[in-house]
Image (cartoon, helix red, strand yellow):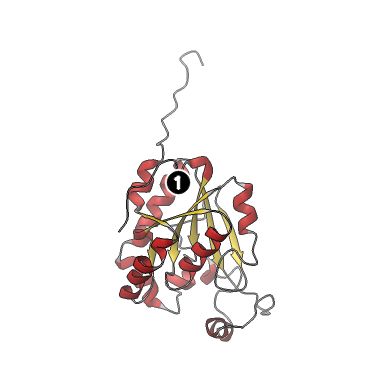
Amino acid sequence: MSRRIDTEVIRPGDTAVLTMELQRGIVGTESLVPQLGEQLRAGGGVDSVRRLLAAARSAEVAVVHATVARRADGRRAASNAPILERAEAMSDHLLTGSVSAQLLPELGPEHGDITVERLHGVTPFTGTELDATLRGLGVRTIVLVGVSLNMGILGASMEAVGLGYRVVVPVDGVAGVPADYAADVIRHSLRHLATLSTVDDIAAAWPVPTERTEPAWT
């Protein structure tokens, strides 16, 4: 289903890797829906994302983490959907600054990464500074990884396309539940919005930095 990526589409100066909700309280040990993290790991997704981020940082491709959290007082978050009503009922989960709101430790954030936190909704652009951040970085293409294919990845792709970005999705860096439904989302919806690829093909398109040597006279 995926195809080899055109290197011009993901040039380092025009591209950012955007991770979606790869947090401890969503796909880690603090998750309230452990099946999602299990599905991501079963497909090697965490390791794939880790390798992609390492390649991006080495090639000076921007790395941006889209996270979700909630204030302890619940402000700035409307409970206007069933999933948001359930989140409101979990008063101690994904609080800003809490362990559950942190990224998976193997993914960062590292020096130079940018984190954009969302306090409401189910997609990363609406109500956040994500669009302004990406435009400030000169980004035209988003390499999108994370969870979930059920809502977040699909919604982020729609928003990004609507805002004028090109979207690339490595299929080994995303997950949803159940697995057969996630595969259907890729097959029937996501392929119409994004260029589908793999982590290895994307990483291979980025230059590997050469080791710098000091001149003999220094």
Whether residue 28 appears in this view of the structure is no
Answer with left or right where residue 114 lies relative to residue 214. Answer: right
On screen, residue 65 above or below 150: above
Badge 1 element: helix
Q: Nearer the viewer, residue 158 or 215?
A: 158
> Which residue is depicted at the point 62% across and 66% down?
126
Count of marks overlaid on the render: 1
Q: Quadrant of the N terminus?
A: bottom left
Q: Residue at x 34, y 59 (%)?
A: 172
Locate residue 45: give its quadrant: bottom left
Task: Work out whether 121 lies above or below 79.
Answer: above
- Residue 192 image-quadrant placement: bottom left
**Picture layout, residue 153 above or below residue 216:** below
Between residues 52 and 31, which one lies in front from this camera angle?
Answer: 52
- In the rendered view, does 31 fall on the left or right side of 77? left
Is residue 120 at all visible to an observer of this figure?
Answer: yes
Image position, residue 64 (x, y; %) = 54, 54
Q: Does 212 appear above or below 6?
A: above
Q: Is residue 41 left or right of residue 80?
A: left
x, y percent for residue 83 = 52, 82
**Residue on which the image places disc 1:** 56
Residue in front for this viewpoint, 129 or 103: 129
**Amino acid under disc 1:** Ala
Q: Position of residue 142 (x, y in %)?
A: 50, 53
Residue depicted at x 61% and y 57%:
131
Residue 176 image position (x, y, % from top left): 38, 71
- Check disc 1: other Cα within 10 Å, few if <14, some if 14-19, many if 20+: many
Q: 38 or 128, which lies in front? A: 128
